[in-house]
Amino acid sequence: MDQGRSIFLEHFKPLAGIADVRLISLRKGSGVEQLSRGFARGGGETFGETLDPGEDAFVGTAAVMSCLDLVVTSDTSIAHLAGALGVPCWVALKFVPDWRWMLERRDSPYYPSLRLFRQRTRGDWSSVFADIAQAVEERRRRARATPANSTPPDISTAPLIPTS
């Protein structure tokens, strides 16, 4: 387990307590044993070994992601996959993150669908997930306040982001 980027699943508990939130694990490999020690009891769901078996890595994960309202992850391949797919994704970052995430941004110049949440002090994941939980609550309130038949915003005047 990468001590700087990997996060124990217990830190996701504040999200499990939010109404209408379902936790679905996309985790594989190291740390997967945490899923059987309480993730499911806390309302979480997992695909287990059925997610991305064989040589087509990430195909199943990409399909699942595309059906989710939001992905919350640490600095892993999941964040990069969600960003590449344009899936809304919030990334929990350690105090001094990988260079790609820069130091003071809340967004990513590489992936417009990502929002970054940072440790304010080294090793403090609790405040990061408290911030994420608060942001999920705000997102939930906004979604409930928006009528289902409302017209989406006009994005035709939005600036284009160069791809090359």
Image: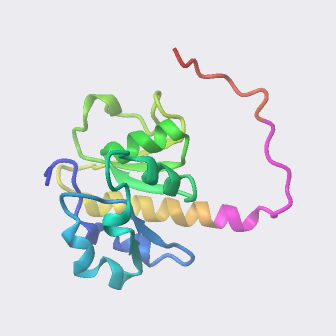
Q: Is residue 148 magenta?
A: yes
Q: Is residue 101 left or right of residue 90?
A: left
Q: Image quadrant of residue 144? A: bottom right
Total numbered badges shown on the rendered structure: 0
Question: Hey, which residue is sitting farthest top in the picture?
Answer: 164
Which coloring applies here?
rainbow
> In terms of image quadrants, where is residue 159?
top right
In this view, the residue in front, 48 or 43, is 48
Q: Is residue 17 above or below residue 123?
A: below
Q: Position of residue 27 (x, y in %)?
A: 31, 60
Relative vertical location of residue 149 with respect to residue 33 in this rendering, above or below: above
Report whether 81 appears left or right of 29: right
Viewer-closest of 58 and 144 = 58
State left or right for residue 65 relative to residue 41: right
Asked if residue 151 is among those painted magenta in the image, a careful observer would answer: yes
Residue 130 percent coordinates (x, y): 38, 64
Quarter of the picture holding the N terminus: bottom left
Q: Residue furthest bottom?
A: 41
In the image, the segment drawn in magenta is 141-154
Q: Indicate the position of residue 39 as horizontal and vertical percent values.
A: 31, 77
- Helix, strand or loop for the magenta stretch, by majority: loop
Q: In this view, which residue lies farthest toward the front?
A: 54
Report the residue at 50% width, 54% height from top: 65
Q: Residue at x 85, y 56 (%)?
A: 150
Q: Identify which residue is drawn at 26% across, 72% down.
A: 10
**Where residue 86 appears, x then y in whole percent?**
55, 40
